[in-house]
Amino acid sequence: MAKKDSMSIMNEYKNAPQKEKIESKRILKVAIIGTGWIADAHANKYKDMSDVEIVALADLVPGKAERFAKKWDIPNARCYLSHKELLDAETDLDAVSICTYNRTHAECTIYALKKGVNVLCEKPMSVTLEEAVEMRRAEKESGKILSIGFQPRMDPNMKKIKEIVESGVLGDIYYIQTGGGRRRGIPTPFGTTFIEDKTAGIGAMGDIGCYSLDMVLNAIGYPKPLTVSGYKSDFFGKDPKTYPWHPEYAELFGVEDFAAGFIRLEGGIILDFRIAWAMNLDTPGDTIIMGKKGSLRIPSTECWNGSVGGPMKVYSEMAGSQVCTEIPIIQSPDIFHEKLRSFLDAIITGGKAPVPSEQIIINQAIIDGIIKSAELGKEIEINIPEV
Ligand SMILES: NC(=O)c1ccc[n+]([C@@H]2O[C@H](COP(=O)([O-])OP(=O)(O)OC[C@H]3O[C@@H](n4cnc5c(N)ncnc54)[C@H](O)[C@@H]3O)[C@@H](O)[C@H]2O)c1
């Protein structure tokens, strides 16, 4: 038998069967509510899917949905002025992407679920824990799917963190430090919806902190949080020098640009969290997961956006020697596509939400707890109502 060269052996791996592609036999009718910045990414990916038709759009700003339809070349999409108008009129939807600002995630999601429509809601799940509980309740009562838009979940490097924890190589976990930050990175490229209380409700935590929390909590199985001591500040957001081109934004700034929390989780695990939209520092630190048998270091990125910043390291002991194992970075697929596709595939197959609300409610409870504790100036208990 002829000997194979190394290239042809490698190519066999490349040609190994990929994840089976699920496509619906019928066209899935999808709507997008909120046609701002992130809606572009949803439209872009949906348009690439042969079994999806974007049939309706809604935005509160008159003419915005129509301009969006033109930009994405979806002339047949019907346009509405609110989520209610759209969901009252469109009685044949399979799914809706909620791409509104944080403050309206809950009302749009609950209204859609009550109309029997599956929902992909952008992150963060909501602003308050109470809203998240109502969203989860509406999902359960509807029998439909609610998935939350955490695309880093689709990143194989993130999945690797969970695999490492579940492999047992770290042993019992007792301390986690996570978070991230940007030296200067308050997001105002398209206006002020990220920084005003009436639209965003929460700042750095809702934008990027929720990714850090999901990264570690998903890895350890989302244990319940018990208590939190939180802190938040807005020194950069309230400073007109932060926006030399729009100094009036400082007046409008109504959320946190930095937050920290010390959280006790069920199982005796401590979670030490800090997140910054702006700071006089390069990074608030890597993510570390410390276990009795080993610890994992996950390098941060300069501008935290929920991706692993470089090869991870596992520190442990082997035959009496202290060793360090490097975990190489894995090339990621298009994680935004995967986020939408996994949601649609769950609808087609009757499967579970890829990023389930029953987990993300815990993420939201921690953010809510940090805010409430920071406002009270003391540690508080976190109680998540049963749904
Ligand atoms: N997954 C990601 O990578 C990612 C990235 C950016 C933003 N986001 C999230 O997406 C959400 C939207 O962010 P954005 O930057 O697109 O905001 P944006 O302000 O650009 O767009 C939001 C749009 O929603 C509309 N809207 C609000 N309530 C509505 C309602 N009830 N009915 C119809 N339209 C309504 C607003 O008029 C606005 O045009 C935020 O929650 C944000 O956290 C996620």
Image (cartoon, helix red, strand yellow):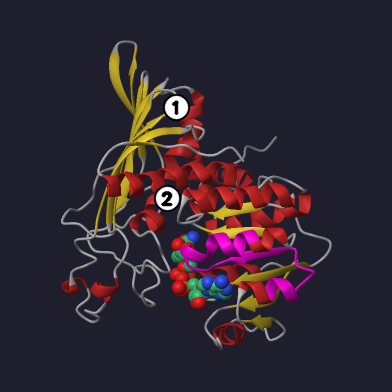
Front residue (pair 331, 301)? 301
Q: Is residue 223 left or right of residue 177?
A: right
Residue type (three-letter) at the residue carrying disc 2: Cys
Q: Indicate the secondary structure of the residue bearing disc 1.
A: loop
Front residue (pair 296, 270)? 270
Q: Residue drawn at (68%, 52%), measured in percent from left and top?
A: 145
Q: Indicate the secondary structure of the residue bearing disc 2.
A: helix
Q: Is residue 226 above or below residue 101?
A: above
Percent position (x, y) of residue 105? 54, 62
Residue 372 within the segment the image draws in magenta: no
Percent position (x, y) of residue 171? 42, 20
Q: Quadrant of the C terminus?
A: top right
Instruction: From the image, state whether disc 1 or disc 2 is nearer to you.
Output: 1
The numbered dot on residue 158 is none
User: Which residue is denoted by mark 2 in the rendering?
Assistant: 210
Front residue (pair 1, 195)? 195
Q: Is residue 76 above or below residue 376?
A: below
Choose top left, top right, bottom left or bottom right for residue 127: bottom left
User: Which residue is denoted by mark 1 in the rendering?
Assistant: 266
Q: What is the crowding at mark 2: few (fewer than 14 residues within 10 Å), some, or many (at least 20)?
A: many
Q: Residue drawn at (61%, 43%), measured in percent from left and top?
A: 13
Q: Is residue 343 above or below residue 17?
A: below
Magenta-drawn segment? 86-110
Q: Residue drawn at (32%, 52%), measured in percent from left and top?
A: 301
Mark found first going from the N terminus, 1 or 2: 2
